[in-house]
Image: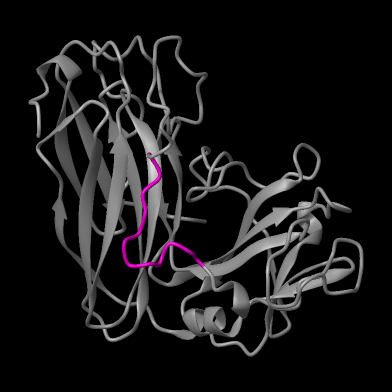
Amino acid sequence: MLAVGAAGLGGCLAESDDSADGPADGARTSPAPAEPTETDGNATPTETDGNATPTDPSDRSGTTEPGTDEPSNEGGTVTGEFVQELFAVPELVAPDSPDSFGVFGDRDEQFVVARLDARGGAAPAVEDLALSVDGETYTAETGTDTGYGGWALFDYEAAYDPGDDPRGWLYFTLANPIDADETALTWPGGESSLGESERAELARSPTDFEVQSFEAPEVVDVGERAEATLTVANTGDADGVFVAAVNRSGPRVAHAPDGAVRLSVPAGETRTWTYEHTVEWEDMSTERPMRVFVHWRDDSVDREITVRPEQTATPTE
């Protein structure tokens, strides 16, 4: 059973001037509103130190085509490959309400996440997928115990469901740490091995992090990209991955999930992660607040940014 840490705000925030608009970008549970929405696609945060890719493609091996015994592309990802990604992570970011993300996982837990695409061949049932760790078998999971965990994980959408859409994710819960020589996702007729660097992540002890700052501009103009920078220090003795959930309120949504942080930070060092979002709203008439929330296992931080309409923006040279 997963425990939720630093839970996101449950339910919609009561904003009388925004409630009629409904969720805009980032809200995956409701239809798009009839009024103009923020559709620029910048809601997904980016990592400024190059750690956005969860795994090194050159470090993956042993992937097979669905229903065959032949490797489709050892050490890389190609179109049509069943296992799109396979990586280790100390915590999960998943829905903790219909319109917010939270962080899941205890300090003595960690996870292996698989992102799958079976459109190119046979789609194994969830119960036929397992993780083998030095011969010990772990069962696949596709949700959390909050009741909201099936429609997203990190920045991915729905869980793997071969009966509905054979694309999606699933995960396995392991002890933390766990030292194994062989770790592989298996299914009838194939397997995909976890790379050496990912197995090393499973073997290292949990570490500690300190969020040193979360800096954001006080004001941005509509159409201008807002950037907020999170600085994280690894204060422990082992390298680790800092995991956090990102939610947003305003200027046109009451509350919405807005991404996830997976930031590799070596022991004794600091790294930064940057959130980016641009509000596109042609008929915006008054200033509106936009607040960005970052939740991690131990705490949370948030910053408010005022978004100004075009007619009140200060001209620049």
Q: Is residue 203 above or below residue 308?
A: below
In front of the other: 14 or 157:
157
The residue at 51%/85% (across/down) is 200
Residue 292, percent across and down?
24, 40
Q: Against 70, is 262 above or below?
A: above
Quarter holding residue 11: top left
> What residue lies at 55% left-to-right and 71% top-to-bottom?
174
Look at the picture and state if 82 lies above or below 89.
above
Residue at horizontal 24 percent and vertical 33 percent from the top? 224
Q: What range of the chain is rendered magenta?
A: 43-54
Percent from the top left, x then y, of residue 25? 42, 29
Residue 256 percent coordinates (x, y)? 37, 32
Percent across and percent down for residue 94 are: 47, 47
Tell me the quadrant of the picture where the C terminus can be found: top left
Q: In front here: 52 or 67?
A: 52
Query: Magenta: predominant secondary structure element?
Result: loop
Left or right of 133: which side holds 233?
Answer: left
Taking the magenta stretch, the answer to whether it contains residue 35 is: no
- In the depicted view, which residue is nearer to us: 125 or 45? 45
Q: Can I make out residue 170 in this image?
A: yes
Locate residue 86 relative to residue 98 in the image: left or right: right
Residue 52 within the segment the image draws in magenta: yes
Instruction: Tell me if 256 is positioned left or right of 79 in this view.
Output: left
Quarter where residue 208 is shown: bottom left
Image quadrant in which you'd find residue 43? top left
Asked if residue 8 shows in the view, the reply is no
